Amino acid sequence: MLRMSEIPIELEPQLSIQPLSQPELERGLQSLPLFQLPLPTQDPSETHQQTSLQPEIQLSESNPEDQLQAKPLWIKHRRLLLLVWGFCSCAVFLGLMYYMYHKLQNRSNNQTGAVTPCLSPACQWASARLSTSADPFTQPCDYFLFTCGSDRLSPESGGRQRGEGIPGHPQNQNEKFVWPEMREKSKEREDRGMREERILDRKTVLLQYLREILESNDKLGSSAVQKAKGFYRSCLDRTSIETAGAEPFLTLVQKLGGWAVSGQWNHTDFNATLSMLMRDYATFPFFNLYVGKDPKEIAWGTTKRYIQIDQPDLLIPIEWNSKTQKSQAKAQTLRPFLATCQKYMALLGASPSSRMIHVGMFVSLSSELAVATAPLQYRLSKGQLYQRMTIKELQIQAPAIDWLGCLQAAFHPLTLIEDDHVLLHNLPYIVQMSPIIGKWLNRHELSTSGPLQTYMVLNLLHTLMPALDSRFSETANNLSVALGSTEGVAPRWKHCVLETERGFDSVLTHLLSERTAHTEAEEIIQNIFSSFKSKLHELKWTDQKSFLSFMKKVQSLIPRLSTTNLSSEAELDLLFSEVSVSTHSFFSNYVQLLSLWQKRRRKLLTEQTETADILSVTPHLLGNELLFPMGMFVPPLFHPTYPRAVNYGGIGFLIAKDILHLLLPSDIYSQSETVHAVGECVWAHYLTVTEKASRGGAFSLSAAQQQEVWVQYSALQIALQAYHQSLKNRPGDTSISGVSHTRLFLSSFSQVNCDFDPYHEFMPLEPSFLITVICARSHLCPATIQCPNKTQQHSSQTC
């Protein structure tokens, strides 16, 4: 017989998501809205006794003589009457229990059987994925100890818990397994790769979705679409790239006038070569170019954009000396860097006798330029960012560069004049760079070796490296490893998607828009934002004035899906009409991509509207609009055919978390006692269940950790409240794998709770544990999460 505790009861949609106390919960289980069954508040036997015996009492009181005559008969049949009364009471009680059981069973059947299953291809995929994932309701004891997306922690799996590395974290106490140092290091990269592959990192999810679009065999797309797909396929064609080798690059160098390394240099003009690199190949050896607004004018509502000039991304590794307040080349990295440069020279056909000479001059020039650079934080403290001056004034400050000519080349065919303003981000570097260039130009003993030309060619090589054969990329990767980088090599498909986006971003935006369910995305955005605003009223702010000011700002925001600057197929075909994609020459395609990249920069300078970043996966503010990029609403995180529970538990939680991070003050912890209280409450649950507190492994959370715990717990509450409101407005939802509503919502959340955002390092516990907290003595969950093999009971405190 099915026990009462095993019957999954789906709850009516609730606006409040605060759990009830135990007495309130027991009363709630007897209330009409839950079971639609009016349960008695008295014992059935007592009720039956009162109704059956009361007439006899009235009779005996009204006629004493009849009482005396009937007494022998009463005494004679008393046992029989009591037996009959007891049998009737039991029958009534059993009948009532039978009615309750079948009522509950029908309720359960209506949840899992009568509810419509989702059979779309997307739902079938989600069902298969759900069946292979850990379920917090069937595996509650260990679920919250799983590393995000990995197998259960064990010596064999090499898994590591999130708290590892946090001083004093209980997961660092009383470890069962001691890992040999070498084994830990050897497994670290493999373990990281497995986690990155399994974790639903939003950027990776979007890139995978764009990959599917680019690899689709749809032949009906516009000309621009076919060119984008052709570019992507040529990037994947490693055979053609390997066969071409370095020859395409060497041919390009000859178009630039050659270089002394090969013995063929036409002594081209320095500024002419620099202008050509900036215009045609998006290469900036001596300084960087950006386009953007002036922060001082943003506050005034101005949308004008300016050319912004910054220090370059030098190829030589440098470090900042805080004592001398200067940058310098790292002594310990010079040897591998020298070896790398010599390897490049060899791959480009330089003779052994000339390699060291040219590499030595390249390193010497790079070191001189490095001394003038400074880290961003230092420049910010010195007020060196966004310094405004005219091009004419800049020419006086740094005469070695033909600024007007170079900028006109970079932004051709736009018209620029000497009186146009530019913004500088490190004027001291620009001022020092000019005499360094002048010195190397005027050294007569170097007139035939062309050090500046070699310097520019090697910078161009760095720009075009992604289009060259594997020997170049392997050389670059070896240097990265020697410099201490632990990042693995990205798979080729991901590299090719990113490169395609650089040149064909407007095409991919068009394709993504065609496949985005705009109506469904807008609905979930509006519902989550509405739930977010109601959640704000639960915060106890220390300063009521600041709270009212914040609420006024929130109320003025208009949340919506970002669909700005979408181009039609005809407009895209015209835009890319001059692009010619070669099937078997990725190098020539890549050179055209650099030209397209420059056109995008030029477009930014003239247009006043914001250009959407197709690779963005988090919302941003633009005036009074809260814009959500389309890249957030892609499978498997979101699909219009999914049950709403899956969408709200997945992307709904992520939206809520993003909104909290974006809109709330960064120091909300100090402005609201609620953040501290909830953070401590959740942490108390964690320590209780993991039994760390009793073993001396407990420690207090920092303010940043408590704030992040509160953010993620609140985001889960907001998403759940929004889903319940959605059910109230539009009753009924489909199911996956026979699971529906709240349980499916939480199962969906469990698959995306490991999203990596800039704040994830502050989360001291697995976010999946929040399911345990929200279900603790709560009417929200379809089943109680119990852990029978734990000697210590879960905390009964509600958060």
Image (cartoon, rainbow, N blue to C red):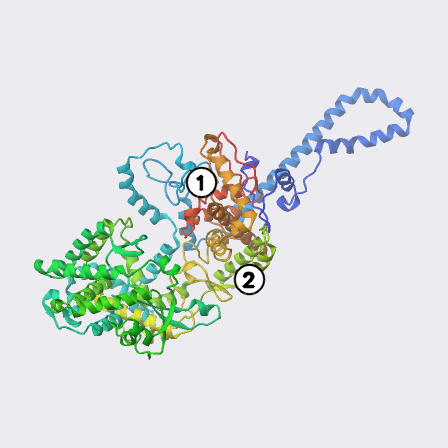
Residue 132, quarter of picture: top left
* 334 displayed left or right of 56: left
* 81 displayed left or right of 550: right
As drawn, the label of residue 614 is none
Residue 633 visible in this rendered orientation of the protein: no
Which residue ends up furthest to the front in the rendered image? 324
Residue 30: where, in percent of width, then height? 65, 40
Residue 160 visible in this rendered orientation of the protein: yes
68 vs 518: above or below: above
Q: Nearer the viewer, residue 499 or 96?
A: 499
The residue at the point 36 percent across, 55 percent down is 204
97 vs 599: above or below: above
* 233 displayed left or right of 45: left
Q: Which residue is mark 1?
A: 144
Quadrant that contains the C terminus: top right
Q: Residues within 10 Å of mark 2 (few under 14, many from 20)?
A: few
As drawn, the label of residue 553 is 2
Distance from Cα at disc 2 to Cα at disc 1: 37 Å
Residue 439: where, in percent of width, then height? 19, 67
Q: In the image, what residue type sits under mark 1?
A: Phe
Q: Residues within 10 Å of mark 1 (few under 14, many from 20)?
A: many
